[in-house]
Amino acid sequence: MNSNATLPSRKIIATHMLIACGPSGVGKSTLLTHLLSQRPTCTLSRSTTTRAPRGNEQNGVEYDFVDIETFRSRIEAGAFAEYADVFGNYYGTPHAMIHDAISEGKDVLFDIDIQGARNLKAQYPGAWCIAIAPPSFEVLEHRLRSRGTDANDVIEKRLAKARFELSQEDLFDFVLINDKLDDACQNICRIYDVMRQRAERVTIL
């Protein structure tokens, strides 16, 4: 081996990963939007889903909306870091989405369900996971019914799933109760700052 040989240069990018879990209606999107506005070092991983857009949601903004056949073909192609069937609709996190964010040096935030969080942490053990919890299940039920977007049977399924999700204490590094929104917004920023100081970094070459 020629000791004078020049090794090819390699770019090492480091980032942190924070997974937010919690029941539908608990306020994850609001808290993550606040965090993104306060911490320019992070970006939100955009999921792909087969469910229909809600309200003013736009394709390529909140989610990438695809049909079931397209989603299944991407599963077969190994395009997803994790995916799950949630109440009859698929949700998945594309590998490409994660790699693009990491290549830009961004800390990556994930808004995914408990099954997806476990799958993602299996691949990225250094990721931190935070549970966003309601002050009570009565408050959560009121929030879900007030949205007016789901049938009663779907709401009941969401409540049952919420109880299961929040019982998975082994997965969570933090539990954040979203009671007073201003306090919860401050606390999620504090959690993110702690993660940046202590968590293992994810690196790519």
Image: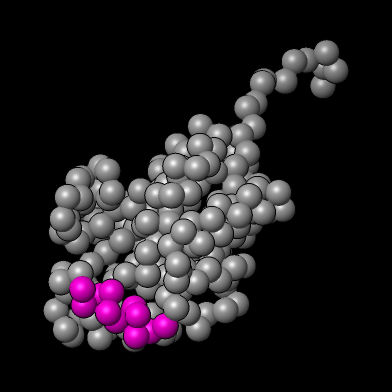
Q: Quadrant of the N terminus?
A: top right
Tell me: 61 left or right of 19.
left
From this viewpoint, which residue is outermost toward the top?
Answer: 4
What range of the chain is rendered magenta?
136-146
Residue at (17% x, 50% y) in the render: 56
Q: Closer to the camera, 179 or 35?
A: 179
Residue 47 in the image: state x and y as whole percent.
33, 53
Residue 106 in the image: state x and y as whole percent.
53, 38
Q: Quadrant of residue 53?
A: bottom left
Q: Quadrant of the C terminus?
A: top right
Q: Quadrant of residue 159?
A: bottom left
Tell me: 5 left or right of 70.
right
Residue 79 in the image: state x and y as whole percent.
36, 50
> Which secondary structure class fits the magenta region best?
helix
Q: Is residue 143 magenta?
A: yes
Residue 198 in the image: state x and y as whole percent.
72, 53
Q: Closer to the camera, 61 or 70?
A: 61
Residue at (71% x, 49% y) in the render: 197
Q: Closer to the camera, 30 or 117?
A: 30
Residue 134 can be seen in this image: yes
Residue 69 can be seen in this image: no
